[in-house]
Amino acid sequence: GLPDGLDGPASERRFVAWTTHWGQAGALIYSGAEEVRGSGQIAVRLESKEASITTFARLRTVKRRADRAQVVWGALGLEELLNGGGSLLHVAESPNGDAAVMRVRGAGTLLIYATERPSRIEVGSEEAACSWDDDSKLARVAVSALEEAGCDVVLRF
């Protein structure tokens, strides 16, 4: 069978696609995220000596604590890595469904797509800050988890 969340018709599967596009000499041209249905497409047009990488993450839902409304989110991985998703050891919802939980290994900026800004973030057992971009709906959280087991990052909404 298919991995969790990939069963059912392709048109019902939802992902976030984070695309970064560089020009000559590594100059950043574009970086952004968008929601994509499983049968959707991401178009990329490259000129000579340009490069682009798109990372896909399955969209998940958690419930906001205040009113139990659904928040959609997807963990994209460490922003500084070409394969940022490789830094994600585990991605899930908390048992009661009110938090996004990720186990991360590596050091850098964890990139998370969410339909709203997190109200609380914990890295390990410490509260952490994030930067938030209203337009792209991306949260950026600094992590340093170089040990083999990694560390847990928890987002509440």
Image (tube, grey):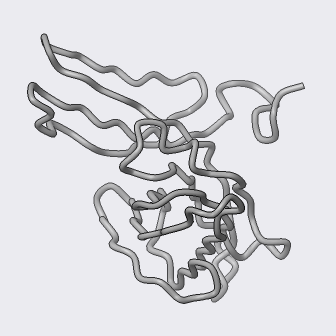
**Could you tell whether 23 is left or right of 74 in the image?**
left
Give residue 94's position: percent from left, percent from top: 78, 71
Quarter residue 139 falls in: bottom left
- Residue at image location 33% in from the left, 55% down from the top: 136
**Could you tell whether 18 is left or right of 40 in the image?**
left
Residue found at the very far front of the displayed protein: 147
Observer-nearest of 115 and 2 = 2
Residue found at the very far right of the displayed protein: 1
Figure check: 65 above or below 57:
below
Give residue 30's position: percent from left, percent from top: 20, 39
Give residue 100's position: percent from left, percent from top: 66, 68
Quarter residue 24 falls in: top left
**Could you tell whether 30 is left or right of 74 in the image?**
left
Q: In the rendered view of the protein, which quadrant contains the C terminus?
A: bottom right
Give residue 117's position: percent from left, percent from top: 44, 73
- Residue at image location 63% in from the left, 78% down from the top: 64
Figure check: 60 above or below 2:
below
Quarter residue 137 falls in: bottom left
- Residue at image location 57% in from the left, 81% down from the top: 122
Figure check: 103 above or below 88:
below
Q: In the rendered view of the protein, which quadrant contains the N terminus?
A: top right
Count of numbered marks: 0
**Could you tell whether 44 is left or right of 36 in the image?**
left
